[in-house]
Amino acid sequence: MIVSKTSLPAVLKIGLESFEDSRGIYVETYNEALYRKRGIKVKFVEDDYSRSAKNVLRGIHCDSRTWKLITCPYGKIYLVIVNCDRRSHYFGKWESFTLSSSGRTQVLVPPQHGVAHLVLSEEAVFQYKQSEYYDPQRQASYRWNDPRFKIRWPIKYPILSPRDRVGRYVS
């Protein structure tokens, strides 16, 4: 496991080890002892995933308490993490990652950071662990093309939910 810092403080990129042979591949996506040994002491309480078709864009979603450990076990996604902490001088700064089943990479996202992903392959699975139980009342959403963030998306007309089309900020 290789842990790397990113341009956003507290956002980490994690390279996973794998075993591959003629039968296929085996990847350990989480081992609490190994993560703690690397200084990652987040306690996760919920695992979730979404499956989406090509050109679906989900997000930008965040809340003030939840850490997320994100991976793409199937397909390929363009992941964007945005600092949504209005008190931070990093507010509005973002970084993108391309995650795929062949890349074996995770991204650890702290609270007050928005998460969005665009499906690049015909279909993809976005999988994540959360440190808090999902509470829609705590969730904030920003429009995928919020002009404050100036995110460079590799698409002009994504497939969006009504929530992601308009955004909904919660303080």
Image (cartoon, rainbow, N blue to C red):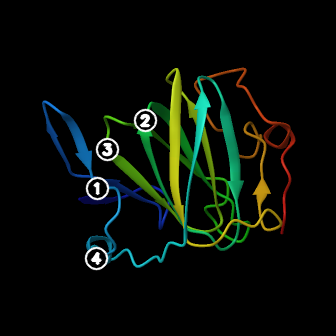
Q: How many marks?
A: 4
* Residue at image coords 78%, 42%: 143
Separation of disc 1 and disc 3 at Cα?
Answer: 10 Å
Q: From this view, report whether residue 31 is shown above or below residue 168.
A: below
- Do callouts 4 and 2 mark residues in contact (Cβ within 8 Å)? no
User: Which structural element holds mark 2?
Assistant: strand
How crowded pointer 3 is (Cα within 10 Å; few <14, some 14-19, many 20+) is rated as some
* Residue at image coords 74%, 66%: 86
Mark 1 vs mark 3: in front:
1
The amino acid on which the numbered mark 4 sits, given as a three-letter code, is Ala
Q: Left or right of 26: which side holds 54? A: right
- In the rendering, at what x and y percent does residue 139 appear? 77, 61
In which quarter of the view is residue 132 placed? bottom right
- In the rendering, at what x and y percent does residue 142 appear? 77, 49
- In the rendering, at what x and y percent does residue 113 appear? 62, 60
User: Which structural element holds mark 4?
Assistant: helix
Q: Which residue is most to the left?
A: 21
Q: In the rendered image, which quarter contains the N terminus?
A: bottom left
Task: Give whichever of discs 1 and 4 has the lower sequence position.
Answer: 1
Q: From this view, report whether residue 18 is shown above or below residue 21.
A: below
- Do callouts 1 and 3 mark residues in contact (Cβ within 8 Å)? no
